[in-house]
Amino acid sequence: MVTEVRPPLRDEMAAYYRALPFANGLPSWEPADAAWHGGPEPWPPQRRPASAEQLDKWAAADFEDGSFHPIAAFVDGTCVGASAMISFEVTVPGERQGRMAGVTATGVIATHRRRGYLRQMMQAMFEAALERGEPLAMLSASEGSIYGRFGFSPATYRTRWELARHEAALLPAEPDPGSLELVDAEQAKTAWPRVHAQVRARRVGELSPPPGRWDGLSDEADGTNGPLRFLTHRDRHGNVDGIANFRLPWSPTADRAGTLVVEALEATNPVAYRALWGLLIDFDLTKTVVAPGRPRDEPLRWMLTNPRAMRVTRQADSLWARLLDVPRAMTQRSYLTPGELRFAIDDDQMCPANNGTWHLKADDTEATCVPTDERADLTITLPGLSSLYLGGMPAHHLADAGHITAHAEGTIGKLARMFRTDPEPHNSFGF
């Protein structure tokens, strides 16, 4: 038996895709209520298996995309496992753009699981990402028990919430100097990249959009879901500073009739944000507003006369992080509180250069992270540091869970103050 782990060739791409669940119409998410899905059911229906024409279309697009880096496991020439990394920029603390490798589309065929092929593909992808100068890897975990053994740990969260229209009253505010407009898909395709670029420049955890991110927007109906609708906000100068995608799906039952689902909403300022939500939570002939994939600290809650009216119905981790190059990752972000720490890592088996004691020193303008022979103030696991990296996880919780061991008094508090981000990191879409 001959095993190879390498990028697939162009004529091997159809076999590569067939190793992935989504290409075969198989489940690609664990059976739990998904916070990214706006419907009442646990998840959307599975897609049909991809046709040969669709597989070839994907292959042509992926080979032209320089940010897409596929990897495959072959046994005696047969593709039995597949994965890929996508090169992104992610906003890190300090409103800086960090290089990141996003792991996506991962699977091993059922007859070849539990043989180490996934680990071999992960190892190959980590090494390739390091060669490209990407110090951070991230993914959306389809199953929560799989990726921790490769060093990944939750770094951002998302929620799905519901709001009854009769409870959706906003607190008084100054009149909006701008205007709202319902637009078509072509206008939305133009507006989304502009709004997203401004939002992601300030939001920790937000991603650079992949090619064609909004190409699929359409005015056509999507089965019983009805067509997607688009709402924009313009400032007093006529510039689009906010946009929302929403739909009014059909329901066969009375309890779900009159639901408005907000599939995406972004605004570059609080005035546009409030104006968009103000219309959507009081839309004619609706009873309930549902919004999936939203931040845990949604500002709308604090604009309501009754904050309890916004009920979180689902919550889940969103992006999991994994540091590949600790010193480079530490210096591509800034820190809320200046300070210095010496921390030790001793558990990274896949990127062993991360093991050792590191001296992190940060001021208001820059940070350094270099090896040191001095005694560590604390020991932290690689998954623990990865969760902490974007600033959304409490250091004290990680310490209570055993991810951090303090060797000097007050170091957990200092770590928490240095790494914390406000507001919490959030990403509006996955990959």
Image: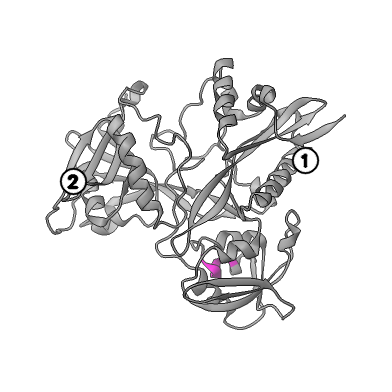
Mark 1 Cα within 10 Å, few/some/many (few <14, many 20+)? few
Q: Is residue 373 left or right of residue 100?
A: right
* Position of the N terminus by quadrant: top right
Q: Residue at x 57, y 33 (%)?
A: 28
Residue type, mark 1 in image: Gly
Give the residues drawn in magenta, as a range.
394-398
Identify the residue shown where x is 64% and y is 59%.
383
The image shows residue 339, relative to residue 42, as above or below, that is below
Q: Check whether the beta carbons of the residues at disc 2 and disc 1 lie within 8 A of each other.
A: no
Q: From mark 2 to mark 1, how far is it between C-alphas?
A: 56 Å
Q: Position of residue 150 (x, y in %)?
A: 69, 50
In this rendering, is residue 58 above or below 421? above
The residue indicated by pointer 2 is 238
Of the residues shown, which amino acid type is indicated by label 2? Gly
Q: Residue 85 is drawn in which quadrant?
A: top right
Q: Is residue 27 visible?
A: no
Report the coloring of the rendering.
one colour
Residue that appears at 44% across and 41% down = 36
Residue 343: x and y in percent read 66, 73
SS at badge 1: loop
Magenta run includes residue 278? no
The residue closer to the viewer here, 90 or 305, is 90
Q: Which residue is mark 1?
A: 116
Q: Considering only order in the chain, which callout, 1 or 2, is on the residue closer to the N terminus?
A: 1
Q: Which mark is residue 149?
A: none
User: Based on the displayed image, in which of its 4 quarters is residue 382 positioned?
Assistant: bottom right
Q: Nearer the viewer, mark 2 or mark 1?
A: 2
Is residue 292 depicted above or below 285 in this figure?
below
